[in-house]
Amino acid sequence: MGDRWHSEVWPLNPDTMLLLTDGSILVHDALRRRFWQRLRPDALGNYRGSTDWTVISPMYHGRLYFASAVLADGTVFVAGGEYLDDREENSNRCEIYDPLIDRWTEIDPPPGIDHIGDSPCCVLFDGRVLVGSNQSPHTALYDPLAGRWQPAADKLDSSSEETWTLLPDGGVLCADCTSHPNAERYIPDERGTGPGRWVLADTVTPDIVDVADLESAPPS
């Protein structure tokens, strides 16, 4: 994209990017952490030639290294943050953005998880969002339709620095970081109401986790 990352509003420092259901892209600013810009494609559906950048309403909280996902209804879910408002480490605060009305709404954090931090999330086939914990093996499920959380099954380790990949069978695969080289697989409850379960998924060979930082490249 070259210098097209520099919009008419400010030089953009992109990190998280999300493709919305209307084809536009939300781009989070890593330095101005409450702010996002939105890029719409041109009339031919191309992004490279488009100059249609707009600034959306700011989040309630500035975040860096947080969980994010586009939900089935087109809204955007964000949770946690390794650095919230440059003060609170490993936050569990959550928000949802509605692109139709350009509005952020804070939602309750998951019960039983005090620190989401830089943990991942994953939208399941039934629309619920599976979220991890930075400092415990706990996970939680958020139901956007009901607007409420429920506890999910515990993992073998915390979810810090992990990336979760949705599988074709509806499960979720992750390469553990703090208990590497183990891998785990989340199996949702068939009824779509229960906590599901995490099971070991063999070991990752060769080990893809950097020992010094306990970080890894995501499975895909």
Image (cartoon, helix red, strand yellow):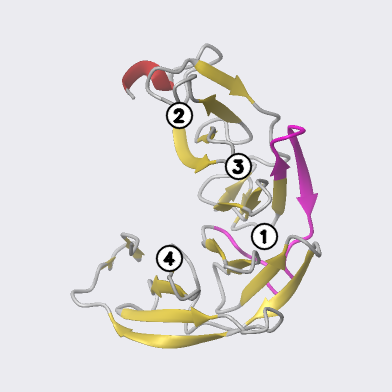
**Residue at image mark 3:** 86
Q: Please report whichever mark, 4 or 3, sits nearer to the chain's N-terminal start.
A: 3
Are there few (<14), some (14-19), or many (20+) residues within 10 Å of tag 2? some
State whether residue 73 is above or below residue 17: below
Residue 210 in percent (x, y) is at 27, 64
Judge whether residue 125 can be spotted in this image.
Answer: yes
As helix, strand or loop, the secondary structure at mark 1 comes to loop
**Residue at image mark 1:** 92
Three-letter code, disc 1: Asn
Please report the residue visible at 57 percent of the width from the left and 52 percent of the height from the top: 69
Residue 75 in percent (x, y) is at 68, 46
**Residue at image mark 4:** 165
Are the residues at dot 4 and dot 3 in contact (C-beta closer than 8 Å)?
no
Q: Please report whichever mark, 3 or 1, sits nearer to the chain's N-terminal start.
A: 3
As helix, strand or loop, the secondary structure at mark 3 comes to loop
Q: Nearer the viewer, residue 19 or 46?
A: 46
Quarter of the C terminus within the rendering: bottom left
As helix, strand or loop, the secondary structure at mark 2 comes to loop
Mark 1 and mark 4: span between their CA atoms?
21 Å
**Residue at image mark 2:** 13
Residue 46 in percent (x, y) is at 41, 25
Residue 64 in percent (x, y) is at 53, 45
Secondary structure predominantly adopted by residues drawn in magenta: loop
Three-letter code, disc 4: Thr
Mark 3 and mark 2: span between their CA atoms?
17 Å
Q: Which residues are magenta?
A: 97-117
As helix, strand or loop, the secondary structure at mark 4 comes to strand
Three-letter code, disc 2: Asn
